[in-house]
Image (tube, grey):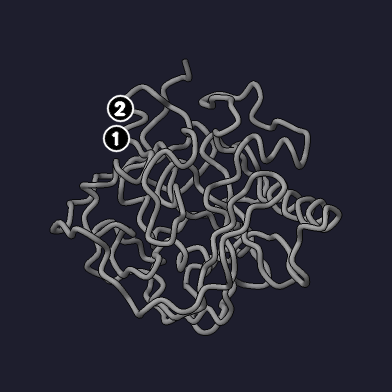
Amino acid sequence: MAKRVARRTGSVRAAGARKRATRAAAAPRTPTGRRARPRAAAPGPALDNGVGMRMVPIPAGTFTMGSPRSEPGRNADEQAVAVTISRPFFMSATPVTQAQWKKVTGTEPWKGERCVERGAAYPAVYVDWHGAVAFCKALTAAEKKGGRLPAGMAYRLPTEAEWEYACRAGTRTAYSFGASPRRIGEYAWFYGNTELAREQYAHPVATKKPNGWGLFDMHGNTYEWCADWYAPRLAGGTDPVGPAKGTAKVLRGGGWGYEPPRCRSADRNKNDPTFTDFSGGFRVVLAPA
């Protein structure tokens, strides 16, 4: 059995330097996430690629990135900004799995590491940012060679704005399923149903409910690398990206060892691009190159 790990409520960091925080009070229960603007046209039907990924169509649109001051668990780097995603794209329905990673790279970076279970449907963890980027490039090459890549498209990591937009799926609440974390166990692997259940590892993908756009595990299970360098202030506007350089890359989504506030749609995390961890994974987007 995996060794016991500390409850995670702070930034992702190396083992032995975990930070604890007080569980945020739950907001009044909301049956479903409060909707933002109506959904725009999607880029097309879902696609299945050669390594078994379901690529979900995500429409273009506008949303408020970040969180209101009143949101329980809010951090200082979540200032609300208006964002427009000008072009539709596809996003993988789940984090990249061990089977998908192995099919593309032939490696197992999680092998022999602590707090990880092995199996085809488990997330690929212990993947650093550089490895995630390399995977996207290799997947693009393989799909192109196999004649399965739509013209002018490529796989890559999502921008931070694309990630939050897709996570929210048109909602404005703290979670894609509502304002309160009371139902988080229906949608996420988090501290309450992993660490407390003595199951200290990322769980098989798509075993919880998806958000409104058909994306699984956007809350909890694994933190997910984004393309952007981290900045303490969010960049608003049209198709925003992080600064041109920095010291840490953005991670989103919360991990299995974290409490609900760290699994919110707006929660931000960061780490050195060489960092690897038992809750560190990623998912990919397919978009115009």
State if disc 2 and disc 1 touch (CB < 8 Å).
Answer: yes
Give the image quarter of residue 175: bottom left
Query: Circle 1 sits on which residue?
Result: 192
Give the tally of numbered discs: 2
Q: Secondary structure at mark 1?
A: helix
Check the image and report above or below for 87 versus 281: below
Please give left or right for residue 217 compared with residue 260 in the image.
Answer: right
Label 2, residues with CA under 10 Å away: few <14, some 14-19, many ≥20: few
**Image location (x, y in percent) of residue 289:** 74, 71
Give the image quarter of residue 145: bottom right
Give the image quarter of residue 52: top right
Query: Circle 2 sits on which residue?
Result: 196
Instruction: Please name the amino acid that badge 2 sits on.
Output: Leu
Q: Residue at x 74, y 66 (%)?
A: 150
Residue lying farthest to the front in this orientation? 45
In this orientation, which residue lies closer to the viewer: 248 or 80? 80
Check the image and report above or below for 86 versus 195: below
Q: Residue at x 75, y 33 (%)?
A: 107
**Image location (x, y in percent) of residue 79:** 38, 73
Instruction: Please name the amino acid that badge 1 sits on.
Output: Gly
